[in-house]
Amino acid sequence: MIRFRSWSITRASSCRMSKLLFICSRNKWRSLTAETVLNGVDGHEVRSAGTEPQARVRVTEGHLGWADVIFVMEKKHLRRMQEKFPHAISEKRVICLHIPDEYEYMNADLIQLLQAAVIEYMPD
């Protein structure tokens, strides 16, 4: 079981992940919400970054090397990383969550979307 603040959810996957990286465009709403909600849950380390030049924390090759699994909010984020860091991203497991840029930081609907999208990739 994973506890997301007031929720308990069951995981479906049995692979072990401990370092999770969430990426969106500006690292202000979606990926930062994921980091805030998931960091420390069941011992996971979570970081977040953005692909845009004006991102709060801009994704680097170091972020990609650190992560066991990378979650992108949209396919455009994966494309941008493939263009900028082709070698660093090629050996990584990258999962697109398909969460559009229409939610503010810690929005309840965004948290529910993250919960539903990420749960199948969390270990037992």
Image (cartoon, rainbow, N blue to C red):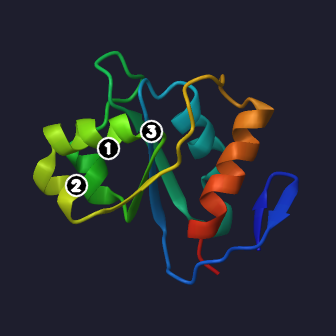
Instruction: For label 1, count other residues whose C-alpha is less than 10 Å away and answer few (under 14), some (14-19) or many (20+).
Output: many
Cα distance between the residues tagged 3 and 2: 15 Å
Residue 100 shows up from this direction: yes
Query: Which of labels 3 and 2 is toward the front?
Result: 3
Residue 40 shows up from this direction: no
Nearer the N terminus, badge 3 or badge 2?
Answer: 3
Can you identify the residue that label 3 sits on? 74
- The picture places residue 32, in percent across and down from the top left corner, at 55, 35
**Front residue (pair 49, 108):** 108
Whether residues under marks 1 and 2 lie with C-beta atoms below 8 angstroms apart, the answer is: yes
Nearer the N terminus, badge 1 or badge 2?
Answer: 1
Can you identify the residue that label 1 sits on? 78
- Dot label at residue 89: 2
Left or right: 37 as drawn, with respect to 13: right
Cα distance between the residues tagged 1 and 3: 7 Å
Left or right: 33 as drawn, with respect to 111: left
At horizontal 30% and vertical 48% (from top left) the residue drawn is 63
Q: Quadrant of residue 120?
A: bottom right
At horizontal 61% and vertical 58% (from top left) the residue drawn is 118
Name which residue type carries label 3: Glu
